[in-house]
Image (cartoon, rainbow, N blue to C red):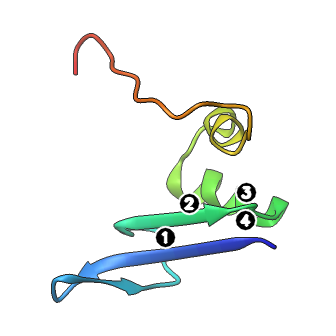
Amino acid sequence: MPLCMFASWSNHALEPTAILAGASWVHVVNPTPEERERLVSELAIPPWLLTHALDPDEVSRIDHDGDS
């Protein structure tokens, strides 16, 4: 079952929102093709990054650039 939730920080708590721009938290589980397109277009997430993040065979990790 797909699940997409977006929240913004307000009054010291995360409050649900339908607006992606400025969202502080984006929680996505098994998104539909339409939800994937929305994430790519509204949040400028590269499609390859979204594909990797949703791949069950990918392991969790943090990558660092040399300059950051």
Q: Nearer the viewer, mark 2 or mark 4?
A: 4
Label 3 belongs to which residue? 37
Element at badge 2? helix
Q: Are marks 1 and 4 in contact (CB under 8 Å)?
A: no
Element at badge 4? helix
The earlier-in-sequence mark between 2 and 4 is 4
The earlier-in-sequence mark between 1 and 3 is 1
The earlier-in-sequence mark between 3 and 2 is 3
Q: Amino acid at mark 4?
A: Glu
- Left-right relation of 41 to 20: right
The earlier-in-sequence mark between 1 and 4 is 1
Q: Are marks 3 and 4 in contact (CB under 8 Å)?
A: yes
Q: Residue at x 73, y 41 (%)?
A: 56
- Left-right relation of 1 to 15: right
* Image spot of residue 21 (x, y percent): 43, 68
Residue, far left: 12
Q: Residue at x 39, y 69 (%)?
A: 23
Label 2 belongs to which residue? 42
Q: Amino acid at mark 2?
A: Glu
- C-alpha span from label 1 to label 4: 11 Å
Q: Amino acid at mark 1?
A: Leu
Label 1 belongs to which residue? 20
Q: Nearer the viewer, residue 30 or 10?
A: 30
Q: Are marks 1 and 2 in contact (CB under 8 Å)?
A: yes
Quarter in which the C terminus is drawn: top left
Task: State which quadrant residue 13 falls in.
Answer: bottom left
- C-alpha span from label 2 to label 4: 10 Å
* Image spot of residue 45 (x, y percent): 56, 45
Pointer 3: residues within 10 angstroms few (<14), some, or many (20+)? some
Task: State the mark number for residue 35.
Answer: 4
Question: Vertical placement of 14 versus 26: above or below?
Answer: below
